[in-house]
Amino acid sequence: MYNWRDMTEKQRAEVLQLRQRLGQPWHGPPHGLEKHWHHISAVCYRHRPILGASAERMAAFESDLLIQLAPVSEGVSAWCILPNHYHLLIQSVNLPAIRKALGRLHGRSSHDWNTQDGRQGRTCWHRCLPKAVKSESHRWATLNYIHHNPVHHGYATHWQDWPFSSARRYLESAGHEFAERMWRTHPLYDFGKGWDDPDI
């Protein structure tokens, strides 16, 4: 399984260069009081690290995910790809189109990964949950939760350490002082409790 913590500084630099070569898009942090924001979470079957088999797989999935969502959304403000699940903060007036795009992506990635791993017929994805974002404060808490997820799960010490996330660009765009203020103003409390249980 891909594990950032066990990599050397040289290996980490190579992974970051891989992400940059793929040209990850960036749409900016949340702004305004627009409606139709959603927090989408998807998990590998039984929380197995199928997605995290390699840095290349995670980078390619991250790129494909953002490319597939671009035509059916008004923007992806935050994302985080972990070895066994991912989170998105997305703005869209057409949730059925989002579901359809993710369904196609999950089907295609399952086929490709099972072929690569010699595991034809394996179930790769278990569920995909969209949750409506109810307020501006909820939106900022969601962004904080998504960027904090690699730290929460022990994959990284700081947000910007994890390569498969929008956190680094968010911090560069918004600034550390602003990000810290949003972290204090919109705390996580029990955000994600129950969903992020590895036994689910």
Image (cartoon, grey):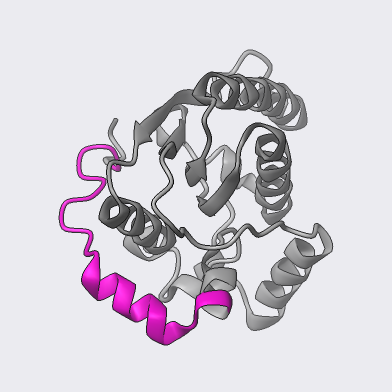
Tell me what residue is drawn at x 28 percent, y 34 percent.
199
Residue 34 left/right relative to 139? right
Residue plotted at (23% across, 59% down): 188
Q: Can you say whether 106 is above or below 68 in the image?
A: above
Foreground residue among 108 and 167: 167
> x, y (%) of residue 126?
45, 23
Magenta range: 173-196
Q: Nearer the viewer, residue 120 or 59?
A: 59
Q: Quadrant of the C terminus?
A: top left
- Image vertical order of residue 176 relative to residue 17, above or below: below
The residue furthest bottom is 177
Q: Residue at x 56, y 62 (%)?
A: 166
Q: Position of residue 31 (x, y in %)?
A: 46, 60
Where is residue 9 drawn, in percent x and y? 64, 82
Which corner quadrant of the image does residue 97 belong to?
Answer: top right
Say above or below: 180 vs 186: below
Q: Is residue 165 visible?
A: yes
Question: Image quarter for residue 181?
Answer: bottom left
Q: Is residue 174 magenta?
A: yes
Residue farthest along the top direction in this orientation: 121
Nearer to me, 121 or 100: 100
Residue 153 visible, this orientation: no
Residue 124 higher or lower than 89, as above or below? above
Which quadrant holds residue 143?
A: bottom left
Q: Looking at the picture, how far across and down is residue 2, in whole percent?
A: 59, 55
Residue 129 magenta-drawn? no
Q: Which residue occupies the extreme left position in the image?
A: 189
